[in-house]
Image: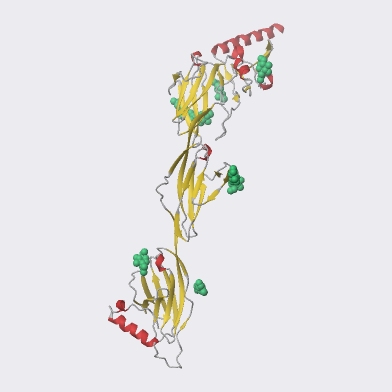
Amino acid sequence: MAYGLPYGMASRNVALCVLIIAFFRTSLGQTPPKSEILPEFLALLENHTVTQGRDVSFTCVVNHLQSYKVAWIKSDSRAILAIHTHMVAHNPRLSVTHNGHNTWKLHVTNVQPNDSGTYMCQVNTDPMRSQTGHMKVVIPPDIMDLDDTADMLTAKENGDLLLRCRATGNPEPVVVWRREDGRNITLRNENHTKQTARTFEGEQLHLRGIQRQEMGSYLCIASNGVPPSVSKRYKVNVRFKPLIKVSNQLVAAPVDSDVLLQCYVESSPKALNTWYRNNELPLKTSTSGIKLLKGDKHNISEVTINDYAYQLNLTVRRLDKSDFGTYTCSAENAFGKAEGSIRLQELHISKSTTVSTRNTEIIEKHTWRKQTEKKGKKYSYIHDKGELEIISKDVSHTTPMSRRNSSSLPNIANKSRISAFPAPAPAHLTPTHLGAQNGVKSSRDHTRSCYVYFAMVILVIFARN
Ligand SMILES: *[C@@H]1O[C@H](CO)[C@@H](O)[C@H](O)[C@H]1NC(C)=O
Ligand SMILES: *[C@@H]1O[C@H](CO)[C@@H](O)[C@H](O)[C@H]1NC(C)=O
Ligand SMILES: *[C@@H]1O[C@H](CO)[C@@H](O)[C@H](O)[C@H]1NC(C)=O
Ligand SMILES: *[C@@H]1O[C@H](CO)[C@@H](O)[C@H](O)[C@H]1NC(C)=O
Ligand SMILES: *[C@@H]1O[C@H](CO)[C@@H](O)[C@H](O)[C@H]1NC(C)=O
Ligand SMILES: *[C@@H]1O[C@H](CO)[C@@H](O)[C@H](O)[C@H]1NC(C)=O
Ligand SMILES: *[C@@H]1O[C@H](CO)[C@@H](O)[C@H](O)[C@H]1NC(C)=O
Ligand SMILES: *[C@@H]1O[C@H](CO)[C@@H](O)[C@H](O)[C@H]1NC(C)=O
């Protein structure tokens, strides 16, 4: 009989020694009477798959044990772990319990990788009887910290980035990459052939020819079926020279109104944004103008659209003659500078307002209306509650071709707005759009001249009657 008994261990305890000798004596030929019913196992020993650090136990159920003893043995190392409830192995994480009847349990606490293997529950009959169970120790995935991989990765636009993520665990984990915002990952091969996919599998994610849209957080997720899976976040930054887009390059507004001027900026790292006023030198495109500061006259604000794009707003309040001219928005970062300019024109309501009939909505109910034609130009006046209003819709579209026309024929607007930009819009010249859905109240003199006009018409009507 080979138990690989560690005698040195056993000798420490006389009682244990006697027990072991008894165990061997029995198994070495003290054949019990033939009539005796031999011990028998009632159930198979379990197999266990257990996560490192957890506790586990094997259960051995033996009937008709009589004076025989139950021992626990690690089969692969042939080490006796315990006999009855006495521990033989020097391992504080092992223990045996007996329910006083027919059940013995071997408990293993804080399971370690070297605990995996085959365990045997044995009874010292002759020949001995035994059964075995397997223990597999699994380890949840872990992501190693690679010194050369910072959490923050930066590349110039069109450059390359290599993201590395190595994971350990048992079984070997699978590493998958995805974007934190759920958008697809763009992958290019050596030939710059583009391909997108929601996920990419592998320890290395090579982002070639990276573009600004690909900026953002990337996650590497390691999993091996043993919970929990782990992930690591990589913040990818793409650096480039600022870009400015102005969708409303021409804005017209009457004296005394407030006007909103807007620029769309793409920049990484974030640019230093400035508004200038180049009234005196309208043709000069340089920024040699007066820098505008936030105050009663000008409100300056910016709103972030995404990682690299934002909108700049400049509100000029209570326009007076000196406010008309050219405004420039400028964005500058370490990679360069961009500018956009907007012309702000006065809108002369009584003299030069021109709207096409097609685009003019005239409110007929409870309004007093008069339409006159002079020198081929149409004027639409609506008198309502003592105030003169001109209501127009979609007055003009200033495409590059028509810009000159519309600049000589300013449009009506309380506040000109650009149509909202699609977030990561490709760089192209959006046709300028002067939205003027709102009516415009005239200044005081206009109201007065209207009253005169109104009175004259009433007189004419009376004279006719
Ligand atoms: C344990 O696994 C072994 C083979 O790996 C198998 O023969 C045995 O039936 C299993 N035991 C139980 C209780 O499932
Ligand atoms: C098993 O691993 C644990 C922890 O790593 C260690 O303390 C123990 O000595 C090892 N036991 C054996 C038999 O190698
Ligand atoms: C890339 O180009 C090389 C030669 O220019 C070619 O041999 C290779 O097949 C191409 N690879 C892909 C993925 O298209
Ligand atoms: C994202 O990638 C998946 C394949 O992984 C593809 O089916 C899907 O069309 C892609 N979506 C976009 C918006 O490109
Ligand atoms: C400036 O504009 C912002 C955003 O439109 C607004 O919240 C803020 O109150 C304005 N500031 C002043 C002084 O009007
Ligand atoms: C800029 O103006 C637009 C249009 O009025 C508005 O939606 C946006 O909130 C403004 N942004 C800021 C920062 O004031
Ligand atoms: C601009 O004006 C010119 C003549 O003044 C005219 O021929 C041309 O059609 C106009 N363009 C638009 C878009 O109205
Ligand atoms: C236009 O201005 C008038 C008075 O200044 C105001 O009553 C009206 O609400 C404004 N319209 C819009 C759309 O802002």
* Residue lying farthest to the right in this orientation: 465
**Vertical placement of residue 411 versus 160, above or below:** above
Residue 184 appears in which quarter of the rendering?
Answer: top right
Does residue 445 appear left or right of residue 8 in this picture? right
* Residue lying farthest to the top in this orientation: 463
Compare residues 59 and 78 and report the one nearer the observer: 78
Where residue 366 appears, as percent x and y from the top left, is 65, 20
**Vertical placement of residue 271 versus 281, above or below:** below
Way the structure is coloured: secondary structure
Does residue 4 appear left or right of residue 254 in this picture? left
Quarter occupied by the N terminus: bottom left
Compare residues 364 and 380 and report the one nearer the observer: 380
Q: Residue at x 34, y 86 (%)?
A: 22
Where residue 181 appears, as percent x and y from the top left, is 52, 44
Where residue 138 appears, as percent x and y from the top left, is 45, 63
Does residue 197 appear left or right of residue 459 in this picture? left
Q: Residue at x 36, y 87 (%)?
A: 25
> Is residue 383 among what the camera can see?
no
Compare residues 260 and 398 and report the one nearer the observer: 398
Q: What is the number of callouts on the image?
A: 0
Q: Residue at x 46, y 23 (%)?
A: 275
> Is residue 5 among what the camera can see?
yes
Quarter occupied by the C terminus: top right
Where residue 309 appears, as percent x and y from the top left, is 50, 33
Dividing the image into four quarters, tell me where ligand 2 lies. Answer: bottom left
